Image (cartoon, rainbow, N blue to C red):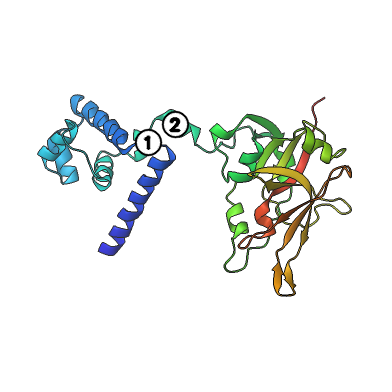
């Protein structure tokens, strides 16, 4: 039982530490927020120093010194103090900062869903899209999105990244705008300035429609590019080993074919951001 309690406490402290990192907040600032909350309750008659001492197991002198900034608290003591007054660490954070990193809500409209428009680097690198990463929310019919089939690549073999398992937790649909170069490389299927709906739960190379090549957003230089994709398997050649390659083909033959090496520990699916499920062009 004691071992179980210790694991629970250690897990909670690790969680508190991670939140401090996420919100870029100093531990001193968090303690100041707790002091303000305690003083408000004490001055309002909701709490006394004696009652707080009873709940936490600290001495009244310890609590008084903390309130008067004569001493600080360790992370474990702060955790105990926060729980003793029925709060969580989130209650001590700036709500505007919390909102910035909150996941984009699904929306309440039964007919339409909000899909976030983001930069290519966000589409390629952020698993869960949060508010501060969103440039705009565009509406798509839920009936359309529900018809779009997902197809996650098979789980990786032992020792390699388990992409399929993680992808299920990603924000599924995102939108990106293509620049002139990207748009012209896929002309006429895609044009400069087009907005693309990316299904990030489709990172397999299986054909979505018969006689129609899939277009993909692919990780490239911390951002993403839009191309047709082929896998060239690696293998031994002489004394060396050739790495597997992801071949990126443009639709417009005036643009070059690109090749991305699949590094050790990766699969092709790690490089694929998602399938282009819809192309919208402003007129």
Q: Provide residue 155's location: percent of width, then percent of height.
A: 63, 63
Q: Provide residue 29's location: percent of width, then percent of height.
A: 31, 33
Q: Provide residue 221's location: percent of width, then percent of height.
A: 66, 45
Q: Decide: is 79 above or below 136.
A: below
The residue wearing badge 2 is 97
Label 2 CA crowd tier, 10 Å (few <14, some 14–19, many 20+) = some
Q: Decide: is 68 above or below 237.
A: above
Which of these two is toward me, 14 or 254?
254
The answer to whether residue 270 is visible is yes
Residue at 70% across, 53% down:
203
The residue wearing badge 1 is 25
Give the quadrant of the N terminus. Answer: bottom left
The image quadrant that residue 129 belongs to is: top right
Label 1 CA crowd tier, 10 Å (few <14, some 14–19, many 20+) = some
Which of these two is toward me, 184 or 95?
184
Residue at 64% across, 41% down:
123
Between the residue at mark 1 and the residue at mark 2, the CA separation in whole angstroms equals 10 Å
Q: Secondary structure at mark 2?
A: helix
């Amino acid at each position: 039982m004691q071992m179980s309690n210790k694991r629970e406490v250690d897990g909670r402290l690790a969680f508190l530490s991670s939140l401090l990192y996420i919100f870029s907040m100093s531990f001193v600032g968090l303690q100041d927020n707790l002091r303000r909350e305690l003083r408000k309750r004490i001055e309002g008659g909701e709490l006394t120093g004696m009652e707080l001492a009873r709940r936490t197991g600290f001495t009244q002198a310890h609590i008084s010194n903390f309130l008067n900034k004569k001493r600080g608290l360790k992370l474990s003591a702060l955790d105990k103090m926060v729980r003793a007054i029925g709060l969580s660490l989130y209650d001590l954070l700036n709500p505007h900062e919390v909102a910035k990193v909150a996941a984009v809500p699904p929306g309440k409209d039964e007919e339409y869903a909000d899909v976030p428009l983001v930069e290519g680097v966000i589409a390629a690198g952020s698993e869960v899209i949060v508010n501060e990463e969103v440039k705009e929310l565009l509406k798509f019919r839920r009936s359309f999105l529900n018809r779009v089939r997902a197809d996650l690549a098979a789980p990786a073999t032992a020792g390699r990244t388990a992409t399929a398992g993680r992808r299920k937790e990603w924000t599924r649909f995102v939108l990106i705008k293509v620049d002139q170069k990207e748009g012209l490389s896929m002309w006429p299927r895609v044009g400069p300035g087009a907005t693309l709906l990316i299904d990030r739960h489709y990172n397999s190379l299986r054909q979505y429609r018969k006689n129609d090549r899939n277009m993909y957003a692919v990780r490239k230089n911390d951002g993403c590019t839009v191309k047709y994709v082929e896998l060239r398997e690696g293998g031994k050649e002489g004394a060396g080993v050739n790495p597997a390659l992801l071949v990126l083909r443009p639709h417009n033959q005036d643009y070059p074919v690109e090749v991305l090496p699949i590094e050790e520990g990766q699969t092709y699916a790690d490089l694929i951001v998602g399938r282009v499920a819809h192309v919208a062009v402003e007129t």
